Amino acid sequence: MPEGPEIELEKLHEAIKEEMEHEGGMFLKLISISTAILAVFAAIASLQAGATVNIALMLKTEAAHMQAEASNQWSYYQAKGVKAAVQEASRTAWLAIGKEPPATYEEKIHRYGEEQKEIQKVAQEKEKERDERLKESDHLLHKHHGFANSVALFQVSIALGAVAALTRIKLVWYGSLLTGIVGVVLFLWTLIH
């Protein structure tokens, strides 16, 4: 005869384990899945942020190179102007003493003026290329900030997911999901625009 009522401990243990899996296990799995998905988005956004800033910096460097080339052209332009002024001063000196200046003075003045026009055109083209690269670089830097901000949101979301897993507080997990969704929207918005 048994000394007390028999309780099937095995069935009770299974029921408790099942309840724990149902309550805590499924919740932790959902947190794990959502956190993994957010980590993938964070990695992609981080790569995009790095790529865009690298291209932007390369374009800024090219713009500086274009500016240097344009400055060289403007210096060359000024040198031609000085040469033309010297020729004009020499021509004027001949005229001041009442003599006809050699024709080469007039020819050189004309040639230097024509050369200046070509040099000016090249310098302005270099400045235009510089401006285009700077504009594109600024656009990419703006995109970089969007990607970087989305990475920050993903990191906060992942941290909230870890807190939710440790504390098993669903409200914290909902906050993690909401922050992650905002990060995804910002990432996609930046990617598209």
Image: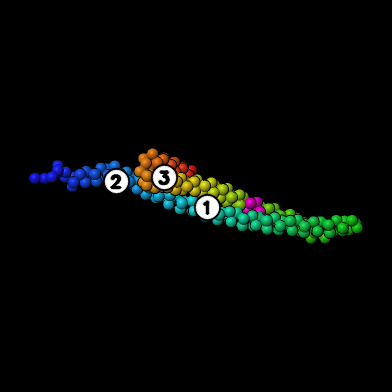
Q: Quadrant of residue 19?
A: top left
In terms of sequence position, does the residue under pointer 1 or pointer 2 come before the other?
A: 2
In front of the other: label 3 or label 1? 3
Residue at 83% from the left image edge and 57% from the top image edge = 89
In front of the other: label 1 or label 2? 2
Instruction: Name the spot of residue 12 as percent of width and height, x first.
Output: 20, 44
In the rendering, which numbered label is found on residue 29?
none
Mark 1: amino acid: Val
Mark 3: amino acid: Leu
Identify the residue under disc 2: 25
Residue at 18% from the left image edge and 47% from the top image edge = 10
Disc 1 crowd rating (10 Å Cα; few below 14, some 14-19, many 20+) is: some
- Residue closest to the eye, 86 or 72: 72
Q: Is disc 3 in contact with disc 1, using a CB cutoff of under 8 Å?
A: no
- Residue closest to the eye, 190 or 159: 159
In the rendering, which numbered label is found on residue 53?
1
Which portion, as a residue range, is magenta? Answer: 122-127
Residue at far front of view: 3
Q: Is disc 1 in contact with disc 2, using a CB cutoff of under 8 Å?
A: no
Identify the residue under disc 3: 160
Mark 2: amino acid: Gly
- Residue closest to the eye, 164 or 185: 164
